[in-house]
Image: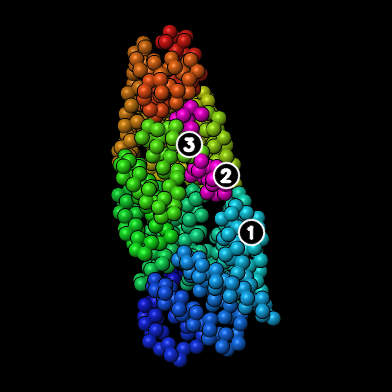
Amino acid sequence: MGPTPRRWDEEFRSLSGSTEHQGASDWERLAVAAHMIGEDDSSAAAWEAAHHRYLEAGDGPEAARCSFWLAFGLMMRGHMAQANGWLRRTQTIVEDGAVDCTAAGYLLIPAVLGELGAGNPSSARDMAVEAFSIGARLGDPDLRAFGTLGHGQALLALGQVDGGTAKLDEVMVAVTAGEVGPILSGIVYCAVILECVHLLDLARAAEWTAALSAWCDSQPDLVPYRGQCLVHRAQLQQAAGDWPEAAATADATCRRLADPPHPALGLAHYQQGELHRLRGAFDEAEACFRRANQAGYQPVPGLALLGLARGDAGTAATTIRRALHERSAVHKRTALLAAAVDIFRATADAAAARNAADELVVIATGSTSPVLKAFSDHAVGTVLLAEGDPPAALRHLRAAAGTWRDVRMPYEAARTSVMIALCCAALGDRTSASLELDTAREAFTRLGAHPDVAKVESLAAAVQDRHSNPLSPREREVLAHVASGKTNREIAAALVISEHTVGRHLDNVFAKLGVGSRAAAIAYAMEHRLL
């Protein structure tokens, strides 16, 4: 059975027309209906009215619960001074009351969010567990759900991926079963899907996004959560290779969330930017990343990968290092680490690339996500090739390629085909290398990934070059600088070219000479008198 259809606009109009003699519970219903159709001021006024009605009836616990929801709504809209005032009033009622009440548990939720934001997941977990216990003892399903969600988020921040995702699934079951109120249902849907995306657990994200879509569709006049649903839909469309549809969804989402600005607007602009970056529209991507940042969303790793694509590998490395330093929560580092491996490889920082890949492996080991495992296999294969061990690299890359095919992620499959081709070339198997590059080129062309098409064509030409001295004058020049001990940045400065161009020349050198590392390329060139 799907979600029960609900017409919030009709409920809002009905309740708004008879406010004179309404009781506290009627004001509560009006507050919820107003929230669900985006009438935030009306919702706040109704929560306040319900609060006062309960106070007049001598029901302090219910009055405190209503003042909490008023405060929480103000928090979500960014009105922190007013929110803090109402939270303080809620606290006063709880402290003055002689009976146990759910508001004591609800007051823990902002504290949980604060501790998570401050990087204190252990204390956040303890508070979330206490909130759940109060909700369970007093029979409040919303408070139980709040506590379970916070518990799951804290476990993820502690690096306990299996335990954290289990809690997220647990709270989602309560939501899809209709046990949780409509306001909190929307909050939980959006929070859980966002955590799944951070974890690169795209199968779980897709499942819950489909459930969120059905929930939104059952409420045709719903306002607050449709935009967030569309953001996640665009992310999944991109992963599935439907880039035109993903772009259309992202554009529509930005328009929908812009007025008034929604908390998810920054993420929507970031998603726009990622699609532009992948298709080679670099100026448009930069503009989108700038808008994402202005809306409060850090545009990483996309901004760093944009720098790499533009040929500024040094700046890209600086950006990704800074982001990794700032973002300590394990479940929010996965995409950063995957990007870091490629960026550090381009700057010939083998140690940093190895560290990033190893950390990604640890995270993937604690997860049931096949996508995360494939990202870690791709990363390890990339590092092993750079370290000069193409046979070992191939084992990991083949495993990643199989997963990409299974989960139907064509762009990632094509990227892995490129790395497999480099391994084959390093082992002297130019025929297989050409086949892999042809496969990658077809996929990139179909997707519209123009920068990747150009890279593949350059590599394909290098693999097919069978002259006695296959290196071009520029490639020999780059390799001579490598042999003298220079880094990619130093070579770029000496030749007045970008680090990205240096990296591309080295990829071509490795492919032509059939080697997998700088040291092996130098040894081969010396032995065959290519320098």
Q: Which residue is mark 2?
A: 363
* Residue 83 versus residue 410 in the image, above or below: below
From the viewer's perspective, is 242 left or right of 200?
left
Amino acid type of the residue tagged 2 in the rendering: Ile
Q: Nearer the viewer, residue 84 or 432?
A: 84
Q: Name the mark on residue 20.
A: none
Amino acid type of the residue tagged 1 in the rendering: Arg
Magenta stretch, main secondary structure, is: helix
Q: Residues within 10 Å of mark 3 (few under 14, many from 20)?
A: few
Image location (x, y in percent) of residue 481: 44, 17
Residue in view at x 37 percent, y 16 percent: 471
Residue in view at x 54 percent, y 45 percent: 326
Q: Which residue is mark 1?
A: 125
Image location (x, y in percent) of residue 321: 51, 38
> What's drawn in magenta, residue-wise?
322-349
Q: Quadrant of the N terminus?
A: bottom left
From the viewer's perspective, is 417 left or right of 123?
left
Amino acid type of the residue tagged 3 in the rendering: Thr
Q: Nearer the viewer, mark 2 or mark 1?
A: 1
Q: Which residue is mark 3?
A: 318
From the viewer's perspective, is 465 left or right of 4?
left
Secondary-structure class at tag 3: helix
Q: Earlier in the sequence, mark 2 or mark 1?
A: 1
